[in-house]
Amino acid sequence: GKSSLINHLLKKDNIARASSVTGKTRSVDLFVVNNKVIICDLPGFPGADGQASRLWEEEFEPLVQLYLNNAADLRAMLFAHDARWPVTTEEKKYLNAAR
């Protein structure tokens, strides 16, 4: 998932805690790349099977929203999505609101 992508981009093994299990990232994790770039790993949306929906709604969504609302220097955001699954209506709605 996203954490594995961060590890690959930074050419580091396990700098971001990666797992084959959905929902491993449960916090806002910041990785300093250099004095201009910081990568942030956030909890993801629930899987296509609806796994962790309640956890997202109760814990992760408020955490992600708090980060996005207070990240004054945020210049870009990347939405990483598993291409095996269609983007859901809920994801589209959330991404449109984040603009």
Image (cartoon, rainbow, N blue to C red):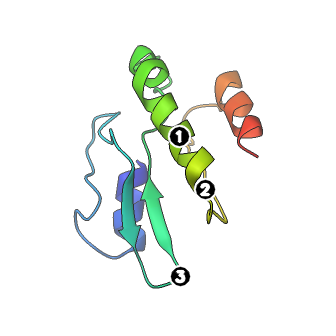
Of badges 2 and 1, the one in the foreground is 1
Helix, strand or loop under label 3: loop
Q: Residue at x 51, y 76 (%)?
A: 37
Of callouts 1 and 3, the N-terminal one: 3
Q: Is residue 50 left or right of residue 99?
A: left
Helix, strand or loop under label 1: helix
Of badges 2 and 3, the one in the foreground is 3
Question: Disc 2 versus disc 1: distance between alpha carbons?
Answer: 17 Å
Q: Residue at x 57, y 32 (%)?
A: 85
Q: Residue at x 27, y 41 (%)?
A: 20
Residue 89 place in picture, x, y as percent: 71, 23
Residue 62 place in picture, x, y as percent: 50, 30
Of callouts 2 and 3, the N-terminal one: 3
Q: Amino acid at mark 3?
A: Lys
Q: Is residue 2 left or right of residue 92?
A: left
| Residue to which mark 2 is pinned | 78
Q: Amino acid at mark 1?
A: Leu
Q: Amino acid at mark 2?
A: Leu
| Residue placed furthest toward the bottom | 35
User: From what the image shows, is residue 8 above or below residue 21?
Assistant: below
Question: Disc 2 versus disc 3: distance between alpha carbons?
Answer: 17 Å
**What label does residue 36 carry, if any?**
3
How crowded pointer 3 is (Cα within 10 Å; few <14, some 14-19, many 20+) is rated as few
| Residue to which mark 1 is pinned | 66
How crowded pointer 1 is (Cα within 10 Å; few <14, some 14-19, many 20+) is rated as few
Of callouts 2 and 1, the N-terminal one: 1
Q: Do residues under tags 1 and 3 come within 8 Å of each other at their CB atoms?
A: no
